[in-house]
Each structure stands twice: as C-alpha cells, then as structure tokens.
Image (cartoon, grey):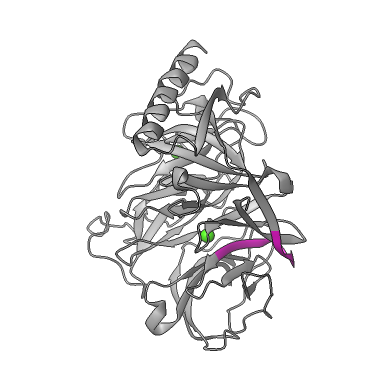
C-alpha cells in the first residue's frame, strides 16, 4: 500500500504541473484520492510500476449536463460521426442507422451482410472511411456466420447518397479460424492518420482457444492492421515470418473491444481482461501483450490464471489496468474545443461500471482518472466526440440511448 500511496503523490505533482503549464487550472482539479477503493480480485498481485492501477481521481470543475438525444436502440454497439454532423449507429442484432444530432432516427440502412447475432456476436463497430468525402465508403465489423461457426469479419460499402443503403459491399477481412462459440469477437475499428485500418479481435474465450492468442498462425487474440482495400501493408511486423498471418500488428490479447488512435498515429487498445484485469495498452507493432501467459486478476469462474503470474520478460505490461474491472467498450482520444483541459485524454466507455472513464495520460502513464456520465445509470458501450467538442455515447441496453454530454450553458 505504501508504494501506491507514494505513487499517487508523485502523479499528482506531475498532474498539477501539467495543468499549470497549460494555463487551464480551471478545467480539472486533482482530488488526491484514488477513485477505486474496493478490494482487488487479484489478491497479492503487485503492479509492475507505480500508477499502473488505481490512479488518483481528478474532477472537472465545469458543470456537465447529459441529454438523451435518442432512445429505443437495441443494444447499440458503436457510433461514428459523419462529416455532416449526423451519427452512424450500429445495433448489435444487425442494424445500422443514421441519427441526426437532434435525435431523428433513420430506418435501418439496407444492404449489410447477415450477422451472427447470438451471445456477444452481432454488428460491431462502424467507421467512416478516410476517403468518404470522395467515395462515401463506410466500414463495419461483425460476427460473420460461417459453415461450422462464426468469426469476426470487416466489410466496406458505399453509403448511398440518400443514406438508405450500402452499395458495392466487399468483405475486406475475415478472421481465421472459424469457431463455433458466441464470445470474444473483439470488433473495434479505427483508421490511423495514414489511412491504415486497425481491427481488434478476441481469442474466443474457450480454454482450448486461448493459446491461439500467442499463435501467429491464427488471427485470434490479435490486433490487425490492413490497408483500406483489405491488402496487407508491406511494413507489417510479421510479413516476413514464416507461417504468420501477415495482417497481425500485435499479439497476446484476450478480447479487445476498443481502439483509439491519437492524431500522431499512436494506437491504443482497450482490452476486456480477466476478473480484475481490464487493460489499457499502447499497442505497438510486433509486441506481445501477454495473454494468456501473464494477467492481472483471476478467472471469471474463480482461480488463478497460469499460477497467477503477472509479469515475464518479453511480454509487455499494460499501461493501466482496472481491478475490479469496469468492462470497457469503445474509446477515443479527446481533442475537442469544449473541454480544452481534456485534450490528449483517453475516454473509455465502461459497461459494467456504467460510466465513461476519463484517463489523463502523461508519457505512457495514467496520472488521473475521472468517471463521467454516471447519472444515466446505464452500461456505456461506445464514446465519441461531436463537432463542437461535446462527448457522445451510446448505452448497451435493450432500450439503448444516444446521449450527449456537454458543459452546462
Ligand atoms: Ca467508436
Ligand atoms: Ca496483457
């Protein structure tokens, strides 16, 4: 405990200095106390470095107001901003809708391929392509029903001028192998500034599948990087490795359901871990993030994972982990105008803990954490930033909502 307390003090000093340097001391204040006070699941486990978990709380001084803009969405999974200010919103059973900023919900867009909508499966993240202004291409990830089971796939298509359908649909990526289970699909997408598409995958959860997270011959438990047309970039880390799937960017993941890319191209992923091991990773080419060899926390069914070891040479540590878990969903970096003090922060949707985690980052460390949008009391699946810098989120409920979080007028 003494180590953690000391770490908090150091982090606070860093944070105070950072705020002062930006001249935005009105934006946030540090409370000094850790937000998380419940007992950890990973009893006896020690963080690899100070501040790797239980960051000190910070608080936004401005009054925040959340507004339900639209409701009646069935387990919405993701939202993406169109250039005209409307939102693309997916619903896990397989629907894609366009919703206006004032809450008018369009009919489901037609032309999407069938999805396997059972368990955690269905329609996942939608992303607006980097060349949308000229070709109107949008991209989406989904659980693809296949002979013998399912797996995550990514398709793209042209959003028709009236937004009613997608045309010339192409499947540009198919995760292999096919497996018959309804868990751990990953399913997050994001484009890097250079136009490369990052896709997150899970390892399908079952004990026999877990080791595939370490197997370069399988896409399971990997983060993927491809060109927008589905071809493999020549500079991917394993293109020269015999037997490796060339689309792999990083390995050793459990179930990555969020990816956020900074304006400078850094890739950050948010991983559903074990009970006590949800992770934030700075996701770099060719790096092994450890699953299922090392992990914080314990099995959901109870019991240690691989003897309870949390570190090993050659296996990357998470930048941050939550124990107890928040069950993270989507994530985005905040660069908006409404909250200048949040710029460079990572916003992470929390399902189980029903909030958006705002993580203050300094040099690949989390030095402050705030829980936003707690007043809705609903599972938050994805988060995005609107044109004016307001934060938008969707809630993973049977009657799911599109919510706008803004500074009080
Ligand atoms: Ca998203
Ligand atoms: Ca890990």
Q: Is residue 303 found left or right of 186 in the rendered image?
A: right
Main secondary structure along the magenta-highlighted residues:
strand
Q: Position of residue 310 (x, y in %)?
A: 46, 27
Ligand number 2: quarter of image? top left
Residue 50 visible somewhere in the drawing: no
Frontmost residue, 98 versus 206: 98
Q: Is residue 387 magenta?
A: no
Which residue is nearer to you in this view: 116 or 47? 47
Asked if residue 133 lies left or right of residue 186, the reply is left
Percent across and percent down for residue 195 are 33, 67
Q: Residue at x 37, y 76 (%)?
A: 131
- Look at 56% across and 30% down and name the residue there: 297
Residue 72 falls inside the magenta stretch = yes
Residue 116: x and y, percent? 64, 68
Asked whether 188 or 232 is in front, the reply is: 188
Count the labels in the image.
Answer: 0
User: Seen in the image, is 25 located left or right of residue 357?
Assistant: left
Task: Determine the image quadrant of residue 40.
Answer: top right
Specify whether residue 127 is in view: yes
User: Horizontal and vertical percent for residue 171?
Assistant: 46, 76
Q: Residue furthest front?
A: 409
Task: Write down the region rendered in magenta.
Answer: 68-79
Determine the residue positioned at 49% across, 64% down. 387
In the current view of this chain or complex, which residue is farthest to the top? 2
């Amino acid at each position: 405990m003494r180590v953690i307390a000391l770490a908090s003090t150091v982090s606070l000093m860093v944070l105070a200095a950072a705020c002062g340097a930006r001249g935005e001391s009105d934006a946030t204040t540090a409370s000094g106390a850790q937000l998380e006070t419940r007992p950890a699941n990973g009893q006896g486990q020690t963080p690899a470095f100070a501040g790797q978990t239980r960051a000190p709380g910070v608080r936004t001084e401005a009054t925040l107001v959340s507004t339900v803009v639209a409701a009646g969405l069935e387990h919405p999974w993701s939202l993406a901003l169109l250039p005209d200010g409307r939102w693309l919103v997916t619903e896990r059973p397989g629907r894609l809708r366009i919703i206006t900023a004032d809450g008018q919900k369009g009919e489901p867009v037609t032309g999407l391929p069938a999805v396997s909508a059972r368990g955690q499966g269905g329609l996942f993240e939608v992303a607006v392509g980097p060349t949308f202004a000229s070709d109107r291409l949008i991209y989406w990830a989904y659980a693809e029903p296949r002979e013998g089971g399912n797996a995550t796939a990514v398709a793209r298509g042209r959003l028709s001028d009236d937004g009613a359908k997608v045309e010339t649909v192409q499947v540009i990526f198919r995760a292999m192998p096919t497996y018959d289970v309804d868990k751990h699909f990953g399913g997050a997408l994001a484009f890097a500034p250079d136009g490369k598409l990052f896709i997150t995958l899970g390892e399908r959860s079952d004990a026999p599948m877990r080791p595939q997270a370490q197997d370069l011959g399988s896409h399971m438990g990997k983060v993927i990087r491809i060109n927008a047309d589905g071809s493999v970039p020549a500079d991917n880390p394993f293109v020269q490795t015999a037997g490796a799937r060339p689309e792999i960017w990083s390995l050793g993941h459990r179930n990555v359901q969020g990816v956020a890319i900074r304006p400078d191209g850094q890739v950050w992923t948010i991983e559903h871990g074990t009970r006590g091991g949800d992770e934030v990773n700075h996701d770099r080419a060719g790096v092994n993030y450890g699953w299922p060899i090392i992990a914080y926390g314990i099995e959901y069914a109870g019991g240690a994972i691989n003897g309870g070891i949390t570190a090993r040479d050659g296996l990357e540590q998470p930048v941050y982990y939550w124990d107890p878990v928040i069950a993270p969903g989507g994530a985005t970096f905040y660069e908006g105008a409404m909250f200048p003090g949040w710029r460079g922060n990572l916003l992470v949707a929390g399902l189980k803990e029903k909030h958006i985690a705002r993580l203050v980052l300094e040099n690949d460390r989390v030095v402050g954490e705030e829980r936003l949008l707690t007043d809705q009391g609903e599972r938050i699946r994805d988060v995005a930033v609107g044109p004016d810098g307001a934060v938008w989120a969707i809630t993973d409920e049977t009657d799911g909502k599109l919510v706008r979080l803004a500074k009080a007028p």
